Amino acid sequence: MENSPAPPKSWPLDKQTLPVPGTQKPGFSAIYRNAAVPELKTTQTTYDIFARGKSFDPKAQCAGWRPWNADKKNFENYYEWLSYDEVEEQRTAVGSALTHLARQGKLGDDVGDRDWSVGLWVLNRPEYLIVDQSALAYSRRTVSLYDSYDTPSASYILNHAEVRIVFTTPSHVAAVLSEKGAGRLPQLKALVVLDAFRLPKSQCDLAPSDPTRDLLAKQWAATVGVETFTWNEILETGRRGIVAHTPPHIDDIVSFCYTSGTTGNPKAAIITAGMGYFCGASLGLHINEAYVLLSYLPTAHIYARGVEQFALRNGGKIGFFCGDTTRLVEDAQILQPSMFASVPRVLNRIAALIEAQARAPGLKGKLLRTAIDAKVANHDRDGTLTHALYDRLVFNKVKKVLGGNVKFIVSGSAPIRPEVLKLLRVAFNCDVREGYGQTENYGSCLLMNPNDTSLGTCGPIIPGVEFKLRDIPELGYTSADKPFPRGELLSRGQNTFPGYYKDPAKTAETIDEEGWLHSGDVVLIDERNRVKIIDRVKSLVKLSQGEYVAIDALSEFYNRCPLSAQILVHGDSFRDYLVAVVVPEPSVFAPWASKVLGRSIAESDVAAMADAAKDPKLVAAYLAEYTKIARENKLKGFEYIKGLHISMEPMSVENGLITPTLKVKTAVAVKHYKEAIDKLYEQGPATVSSKL
């Protein structure tokens, strides 16, 4: 039985967290807890999540995919499904097979039945879920790699985590075997090669699609001391000798989740068996229904893994995207998900498309503008999201962009503009909220309360977790600040990780002797006792005149401009002003540039937009948009951008400018744009007034 309380009858909006009397100490705020559910403890593990979901209906659909049509060389326009029973059978077969390999010494002489690492270098697909659940059932540790990782990054992680067997696709086989041959993966003993795409269910038991390729891989692998298997070979091996599950205890390690840092090697956050179940129980007080989830966020990120575990917990079903992010809308329209877990980059794009249609000339654009204005007014008045006329005339078409069935959208991973959340709420007529978490607390720390129409924060601490602020007087942030207390966010709960694998120094920097997780994020507690992220502890740059500037916070602030898709604000200790490199949002930039320059520029014409980006008149107009935002928000003069370079080349994982979790690698990006930044400083500061 689940040992967690029933959901509260209502979630307070006036005071959403409450201070615990007598807990304030010098240099810190009082400890705050969730006002609706301050206490929550669980004793179950992540292994119990699947059992809970299966108990609702073992025959229910669990894991789905769009089958690959080899003749058409395309994905089918439908999903096929494995039931909970079928996933249970396959995870047991996989786990049993790995037990046999371990007992035969094929994974190393020092390997027993449990407590060793399984690598997953694959995109989101049913096999990922099956292997992950298999590892939980047999107390093994999963290590997931971003599909976009280069060979050195992947090799570092596989070696650091002492991975014995890797499940991967043909695209990564050469990288793994080359690193093994070079002596950089001494502990790797086996490789399971999946087909690039999953076939229809009726064909999944057939021979691999390219036996010649697999034979060559097997021959190469043998020369470097690695044994290779196909997916079906692993299943058949396990089915010949089923081994009973050996589930983990609550404090056992079940995964290493590598944080994609903007500098240096990634750190391996230790994920224990109890962390995931606790987060599911806590967030389940907000949403406790079986929903359909579109899985497309990278499963190497704790955010993606958390929402998938949450779907399983409630007996929901997970449909995996086809692997091509440009076809995400197509996947959604076929799957018709009821929950859409996303990140600002994707949601900003969806909002920009809606805004672009609203700016269209003629009756169609006017109707959409009128409809948005009416629904926003209703939202701000009493939280109403429905409109009898405009939902039927306008927004039912908008909802079909994501399949027409979305009931809940959550944004995480980075801050999102409040106006985007509001637009998505009224356009999709559904619950849209922002949350906050870290790898180190299983991606779960803050979540907006339902029916909160006052946007701009991440909401209160989740049930069962507590937080406090640490004063940072050297940066001007203290818990005594007026009107709102400010400081570094510290949190503590059952979801707090025990530390970083093989890194006691970083662990000591991150978790103090009382068990508080130091986030590195500067926050304020607003009038409703909600938490708002305002800065990063280590993102300050001291300008030549002695003023400190929060570079990351300013980048996030200026990225509120609808014109911007990405921005890098840059400060230099030898300069007294800021410059920036911006990548525009094409759907917004093209019509705006057309208006500024008096000539038609199409969103699809990248060359024309790149040419416009060099025009001094347009650059000045773009800079004026940032200046307007700075004035309206009363930024200090030294926080204004006074030099701007516009680039039409997005910062991406492929060009090495952002991490797989979409955070800008500041040092790398500054080096990449060095010539442009140097030129901006040579030109001197633009004449910008902070006066209205």
Image (cartoon, rainbow, N blue to C red):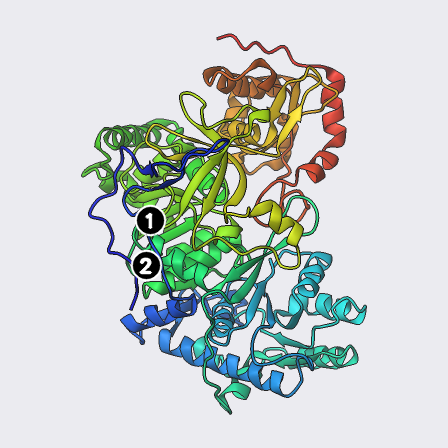
Quarter of image, res 263: top right
Q: Name the residue under label 1.
A: 408
| Residue positioned 29% across, 59% down in the render | 4
C-alpha span from label 1 to label 2: 9 Å
Instruction: Please tell me whether mark 1 sits on a helix, a strand or a loop.
Output: strand
Instruction: Please tell me whether mark 2 sits on a helix, a strand or a loop.
Output: loop
Q: Nearer the viewer, residue 60 or 366?
A: 60
Quarter of image, res 289: bottom left
Q: Residues within 10 Å of mark 1 (few under 14, many from 20)?
A: some
Residue 645 in sight:
no
At label 2, the amino acid type is Tyr
Q: In this view, does 150 lie above or below 567?
A: below
Q: Nearer the viewer, residue 261 or 337?
A: 261
Q: Mark 2 points at which residue?
A: 291
Circles 1, 2 touching at the beta carbon (< 8 Å): yes
| Residue positioned 65% across, 64% down in the render | 161
Q: How crowded is mark 2: few (under 14 residues within 10 Å), some or many (20 or more)?
A: many
Quarter of image, res 2: bottom left
At label 1, the amino acid type is Phe
Q: Position of residue 153 (x, y in %)?
A: 69, 56
**How many numbered discs?**
2
Per the rendering, the mark at residue 197 is none
